[in-house]
Amino acid sequence: MAQCNYVIVGGGQAGCRAALALRDADRNGKIVLIGAESHPPYERPALSKGVLKGSALPQSVIIRQLDQLAEMAIETHLGQAVEQIDVASSEVVLDDSRRLKFDRLLLATGSRARSLSVPGVNLLNIHSLRTLDDCLALSESLQSCQKLVVVGAGFIGLEVAASARERFGCQVTVVEAGSGVLQRAAPDELRSAVQTLHKSNGVHFLFNDGVSRFEGDSKLEHVILASGRVLKADCVVIGIGVIPETRLAERAGLEVDDGIVVDEFGETSQPNIFAAGEVTRHKNLFLGAPTRRESWQVAQNQSTIAAHAMSGLRKAYNEIPWFWTDQFGHNFQLIGETGPTLQRVTRIYDGALKSTTFFLDKQAVAGAQSVNSGKDIRLVREAIRRGMNITPEQLADPTVNLKSHLVRDPVLW
Amino acid sequence: MADENWEEVAKVGDIDDEEAIRVEVDGKPVALYFVEGTYYATDDICTHEHASLSEGYIDGTTVECPLHQGVFCLKTGKALQAPVEKDVAVLPVKVVDSKIYIQYLS
Ligand code: FES
């Protein structure tokens, strides 16, 4: 077979994982990875946590260094944007007008931070947090920050709030349009546990309010809220969500619906064009309905599925969704289904803040949420896969060993 | 290596099958695992971030970190599943007269 030309647009976790998986699957293909940022591919979760807190080095988030990629014959073009996909000629057009031919193209363009369109948003010391450079700039600002205002009480906003208190001891006020934290993403138990944790660590919340403008003399000084309240601030972080970076796909005529639409193999509406990671609205057989998820897991694993499909190994994406966040030294995780209609059972462990809420669908464990009990999450993954014979009373009892209630795997036993 | 620096950390029967406990060896936290009749020991702290592997999930001769599901081989310490990339240190274990000893490097 002639050598296949693979082009990957997007140099983040999904793009890099896809490149590595492609190299595994196709020893001889030509693989080109194009990234808009100049850093080698890196993972983002630690940017708002370990790196910002200073417990992890910026270097530690790098997935592969450029020389490691070169050794695997993965060609990289970093700091370079793709202007256009020429579908008719199967070429991508770079910002310096160069054209690269592809047989198979992968779009792993990720997301960009949503910004606020209010007066004063371009003042100094107003940040968003998406890239490694954003993280380093924010760290720098926080060094001399006494009063931090975080706009948005989603995961990023809360992680930044926690890191800023822990490392820099800033006074932190979180302004949120909704009536509580994590309104988009989490079950009630998680929301209240996180909110309580933040309050007990001195984070102030202003709910049902928003920013009407920022004021200052080149540098930020005040945040003026919709309610009329005025907050003194040295630094602001805007964490009001992300927008999937679908512009390139739209211009190429691919189907887009709040994310590039792909099937369970990562294929877009255009043959030979695939998409991976959080830019996709993808099909996951476990969930049924197409979904777009901003998670490490999707970047890591759905990208591998897409890469395999590109190389001709079609295997459907079928994975139990899993998510984690670390705040104030506490670890919170979600797995499987955690919808409001499911029956809930909570087990509370002795001592430190440690608990697991199980979500039951007709007696069967369908999902869970944990506070510092990650091992239970792993057990629930097993329970969803192969079943667990357990009563709600036993689930609630922290002395009951969950592992011994798992249905034995017929394949293994 | 000379046969020294063995520290008594636990007794046979202290750990159930497919479980782990956290012990201290030379003042440092170590995870001691018991799987199908064999004891294994690794550094307790994950090589990714600050998590205790003794609170992880044991599956055969692997342990999965409770924080972000990185997986290590108990026999070799090898990092087997992202996000962990760096291997974890393994320590020799021996059982004498129903007492469990772990050896540390001085
Ligand atoms: S701390 Fe162990 S996998 Fe992250």
Image (tube, helix red, strand yellow):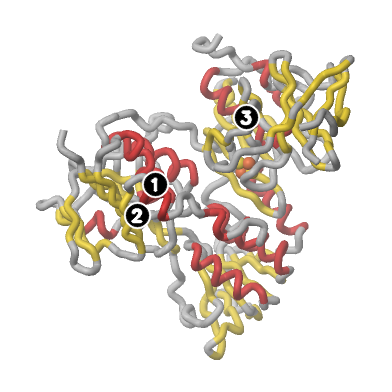
Q: Is residue B71 above or below residue A111?
A: above
- Three-letter residue code for mark 3: Thr
Within-10-Å neighbours for mark 3: few <14, some 14–19, many 20+: some
Relative horizontal placement of residue A262, taking residue A4 as reference (left or right): right
Considering depth in this image, is B81 or B57 the residue closer to the camera?
B81
Within-10-Å neighbours for mark 2: few <14, some 14–19, many 20+: many
At which x and y percent is residue A381? 56, 28
Q: Is residue A116 visible?
A: yes
On what subunit does the disc labeled 2 rest?
Answer: A
Residue A10: which numbered mark, if any? 2
Q: Secondary structure at mark 2?
A: loop
Considering depth in this image, is A323 or A411 the residue closer to the camera?
A411
Q: Residue at coordinates 48% horizontally, 59% vertically from top-left?
A: A241
Within-10-Å neighbours for mark 1: few <14, some 14–19, many 20+: many
Residue B76: which numbered mark, if any? 3
Mark 3 or 2, which is nearer the eye?
3
